[in-house]
Image: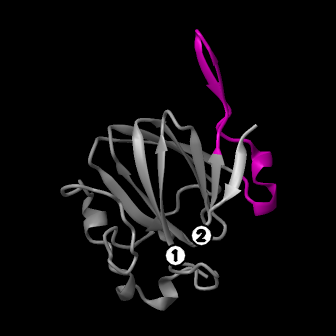
Amino acid sequence: MAQIRPSTAIEGVYIVELQSHGDERGRFTEVYRKEWFPQRGWDALQWSRSESQQGVLRGLHYHHRQVDYWHCGMGTLRVGLLDLRRSSPTRGQGQVIELDQEVLRGVFIPAGVAHGFYAVTDAMLFYLVDSYYDGTDEWGVAWDDPDAGLDWGIEGVPILSPRDQNNPRLRDVPAEDLPN
């Protein structure tokens, strides 16, 4: 059974240490069970897969309504999290978590926590969300905002989408655009 522990930095974020069973044929891992998160009141509705080449950075993105659960299926990802919720006791706190195909781990990300990842290697991310894609609930903050204080451990310049290149600094986000 997976071991689920709360983040020590951000309230509502959970790190899931997955358990794998293997033999000479390979291995089996339960990546997600609805019962792992019953107290958090969410139902996963959409399962997606994102593939990134080494050096790509996606984020930081946040939602007012959507909850995410992430698992790295291939390669190594460095996940950056930043609590933007105005009502959260951990508002402004950040955390960087490594996800990879060998150390089996998942991360539960509540609405209002900005999230992104850096592909340390070519990588594949699987993610479950509790609502279908809604472009009106897509927001962003600059991944390298010094006010975020995230140490991504990146050497060189990451590969960014035009959208992520133009994400504002946190201080430039109107208060009404931040989640509760």
- Between residue 164 and residue 16, name the one nearer to us: 16
Dividing the picture into quadrants, the one containing residue 139 is: bottom left
Q: Position of residue 94 (x, y in %)?
A: 48, 70
- Mark 2: give few (<14), some (14-19) or many (20+) Cα within 10 Å: many
Residue at 61% from the left image edge and 82% from the top image edge: 180
Residue at 48% from the left image edge and 83% from the top image edge: 177
Q: Position of residue 50 (x, y in %)?
A: 43, 43
Q: Amino acid at mark 1?
A: Gln
| Residue 82 seen in this snapshot | no
Q: Is residue 166 above or below residue 21?
A: below
- Asked if residue 41 lies in the magenta stretch, the reply is yes
Q: Position of residue 168 (x, y in %)?
A: 32, 78
Contact between marks 1 and 2 (CB within 8 A): the answer is yes
Q: Amino acid at mark 2?
A: Ile
- Asked if residue 24 lies in the magenta stretch, the reply is yes
Which residue in the protein does label 2 denote?
10
- Between residue 160 and residue 152, name the one nearer to us: 152
- Between residue 120 and residue 49, name the one nearer to us: 120
| Residue 117 seen in this snapshot | yes
Dividing the picture into quadrants, the one containing residue 37 is: bottom right
Determine the secondary structure under disc 2. loop
* Side (left or right) of 28 relative to 157: right
Q: Position of residue 150 (x, y in %)?
A: 39, 68
- What residue occupies the far top of the structure in this picture? 24
* Side (left or right) of 18 relative to 37: left
Q: Point out the tag, 1 or 2, that comes first from the N-terminus.
A: 2
Distance between the alpha carbons at the discs numbered 1 and 2: 6 Å
Query: Magenta span covers which residues?
Result: 17-43
Residue at 66% from the left image edge and 67% from the top image edge: 12
* Side (left or right) of 41 relative to 152: right
Which residue in the protein does label 1 denote?
93
